[in-house]
């Protein structure tokens, strides 16, 4: 390095640069490693995996009569296939939102509180790029949450209950392969729903240096939305509330599949992600990082 | 038939603004939303190869300045350049050549030292992933952390943490190193080690911008110094200039003070202060060696001739009219 001429940038920096896409893949891998090797996050996934086991054992021991109990629970005793999907219904009001709030609320605020945000920014990482990679990590974790429940549910279900051809909610039997395809669709749909909450959490996470604050705000949004969704007097706003569409995944378990609600759910999700993603971007790209 | 095609502008302009400073600020100002003016009209220029001491008491605006220089905080007024490029526009091109340690080390407590550096390396889009492990291990080795590479950051001592921060700043060859209080909280042994690393880096040709509230540190390590007080730069120049600004004095112990005073004054010192057993005067433009010669020729008996260098604390008191918060 020359000391007399500090204008090193006359040399093209691309000489040492990776292709941009490969560099971003490398950063994304680093982010995924950070998310999926953190013990807290792994512990939460383990708890999610335990939920279908708990539910399966309870159903097995109590065997509710046909026609009773919440949706999908009846089907579990007919075919273990439904255990994971029934667990999603149980986990979606509070458990999944809480786990998502922890990871998304921590995403930027956690880096800010530990001071690692300033290190990343002076690398330089680029604030927009950092936000995109952070959200990719959150979305990947959302997918992992749902997949863990569904897979754990399938395994536990077939250990505790009958297997074989699956009779769907509409009463039509389908092959096992087709049923697994449906389970995959449900997983993707629910992952998008959860990642939508993650976008809200990401936004809160850019507002503060206190991860707990962002997590609490995210859980609050999820819970308040569900409470509003349960009040019939304000039905007019229900379709704008995000949790209103979560259980639309059950339409994917009918023959033929009903896509109306699923489509609307995905559109509402896209709108939420666009709005909160933009807010997060506007905030992170302009804020003074003093932590 | 020829067609004249205007050449497209390149991504890397071949004629950057002509400036010989590695770091230059013009009227850099930061007023926080609360109304507090942390940095007020800062004009700085750091020449290439300098080890620049950025000196000032806690709360004088040093860290805010550094955060502005690195693009973490947006200035409310003024402009600045790094490596001859306007910032923050050129941040993506410039910052890879700038290593930084800001306000103490900050890492993921649940990752090892090596994994922490690999994380930072992965965030850098201007280097390839293949040599990442080698870069990281060399940086760890350079600061003496090779043996603790796999230990979790949580288990590091304060000295090891500070050194990991330095390793992050040295992950790749840099043109400029910005270090914010790099010896804060270290024991004397750790302080010596960190200063040795800084000197080593400076000797390698890297320009170092070192903020400190320790006078001794700046005196030991730096070639240039800027002094901050209440958000304003009250002095900037070479270390020697700073000492001269405060006035080097000569003291002559003699049995004939009046005669000595006459000789000194004639040779261009400041107004001599005649005391019982000698005389004291500001050296100013006079040459101390010629003063000795002149005294001897004039037949003034000299018991002792002392050139007194003021230390930086005296200088600071001189510049600000107030004391300095000194840790050591």
Image (cartoon, coloured by chain):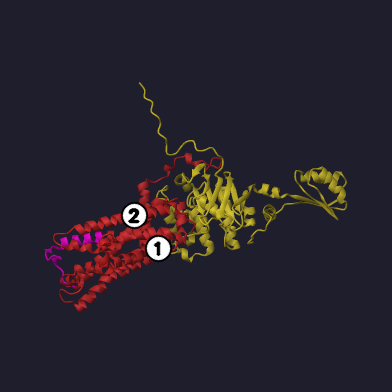
Give the residue at the far front of this rendering: A233
Quarter of the picture holding the C terminus of chain B: bottom right
When the figure is inspected, residue A234 is found, relative to residue B207, above or below; the finding is below
Tell which chain the image draws in red. A
**What residue range appears in magenta?**
A161-189
Instruction: Report the residue at 15% width, 73% height from top.
Output: A67
User: Can residue A167 be found in the magenta stretch?
Assistant: yes
Chain letter belonging to callout 1: A
Give the percent coordinates (x, y) of residue A88: 25, 67
Sequence order check, earlier mark of 2 and 1: 1
Give the residue at the far top of this rendering: B1
Element assignment for label 1: helix
Residue A214 - label: 1
Tell which chain the image draws in yellow. B
Element assignment for label 2: helix
Marks 2,1: beta carbons within 8 A:
no
User: Can residue A21 be found in the magenta stretch?
Assistant: no
Report the front residue among B133 and B287. B287
Q: What residue is disc 2 on? A: A275
Chain letter belonging to callout 2: A
Front tag of 2 and 1: 2
- Left or right side of A43 for B240: right
């Amino acid at each position: 390095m020359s000391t007399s001429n500090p204008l090193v940038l006359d040399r093209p920096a691309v000489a040492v640069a990776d292709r941009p896409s490969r560099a971003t893949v490398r950063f994304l891998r680093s982010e995924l490693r950070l998310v999926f090797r953190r013990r807290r996050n792994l512990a939460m996934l383990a708890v999610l995996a335990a939920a279908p086991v708990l539910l399966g054992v309870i159903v097995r021991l109590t065997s509710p009569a046909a026609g009773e109990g919440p949706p999908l629970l009846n089907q579990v005793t007919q075919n273990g296939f439904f255990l994971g999907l029934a667990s999603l219904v149980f986990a979606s009001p509070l458990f999944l939102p809480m786990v998502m709030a922890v990871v998304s609320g921590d995403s930027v605020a956690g880096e800010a509180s530990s001071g690692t945000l300033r290190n990343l920014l002076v690398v330089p990482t680029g604030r927009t790029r950092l936000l995109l990679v952070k959200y990719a990590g959150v979305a990947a974790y959302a997918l992992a949450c749902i997949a863990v429940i569904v897979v754990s549910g399938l395994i536990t279900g077939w250990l505790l209950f009958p297997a074989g051809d699956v009779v769907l909610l509409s009463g039509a039997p389908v092959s096992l392969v087709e049923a697994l395809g449906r389970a995959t669709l449900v997983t993707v749909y629910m992952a998008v729903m959860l990642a939508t909450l993650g976008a809200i959490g990401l936004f809160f996470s850019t507002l503060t240096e206190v991860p707990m604050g962002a997590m609490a705000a995210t859980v609050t949004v999820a819970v308040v939305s569900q409470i509003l969704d349960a009040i019939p007097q304000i039905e007019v706003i229900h379709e704008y509330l995000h949790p209103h569409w979560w259980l639309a995944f059950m339409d994917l378990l009918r023959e033929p599949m009903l896509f109306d609600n699923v489509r609307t759910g995905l559109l509402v999700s896209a709108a939420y992600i666009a709005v909160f993603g933009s807010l997060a971007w506007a905030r992170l790209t302009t804020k003074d990082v003093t932590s | 038939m020829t067609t004249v095609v205007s050449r497209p502008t390149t991504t890397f302009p071949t004629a950057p603004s002509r400036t010989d400073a590695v770091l230059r600020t013009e009227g850099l100002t930061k007023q926080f939303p609360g109304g507090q003016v942390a940095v007020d009209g800062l004009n700085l220029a750091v020449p290439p190869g300098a080890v620049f001491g950025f000196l000032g008491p806690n709360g004088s605006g040093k860290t805010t300045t550094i955060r502005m220089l690195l693009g973490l905080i947006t200035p409310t007024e003024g402009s600045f350049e790094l490596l001859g490029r306007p910032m923050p526009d050129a941040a993506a091109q410039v910052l890879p050549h700038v290593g930084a340690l800001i306000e103490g080390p900050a890492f993921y407590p649940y990752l090892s030292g090596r994994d922490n550096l690999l994380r930072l390396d992965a965030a850098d889009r201007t280097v390839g992933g293949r040599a990442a492990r080698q870069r990281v291990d060399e940086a760890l080795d350079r600061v003496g952390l090779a043996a603790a590479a796999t230990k979790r950051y949580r288990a590091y001592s304060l000295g090891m943490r500070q050194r990991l921060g330095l390793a992050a700043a040295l992950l790749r060859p840099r043109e400029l190193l910005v270090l914010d209080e790099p010896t804060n909280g270290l024991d004397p042994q750790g302080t010596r080690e960190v200063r040795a690393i800084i000197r080593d880096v400076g000797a390698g040709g890297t320009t170092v911008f070192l903020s400190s509230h320790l006078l001794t540190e700046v005196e030991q390590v730096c070639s240039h110094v800027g002094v901050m007080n209440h958000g304003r730069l009250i002095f900037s120049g070479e270390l020697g200039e700073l000492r001269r600004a405060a006035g080097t004095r000569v003291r002559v112990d003699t049995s004939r003070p009046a005669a000595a005073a006459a000789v000194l004054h004639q040779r261009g010192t400041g107004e001599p202060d005649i005391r019982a057993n000698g005389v004291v005067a500001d050296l100013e433009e006079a040459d101390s060696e010629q003063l000795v010669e002149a005294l001897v020729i004039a037949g003034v008996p000299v018991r002792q001739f002392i050139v007194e260098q003021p230390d930086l604390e005296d200088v600071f008191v001189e510049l600000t009219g107030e004391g300095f918060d000194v840790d050591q």
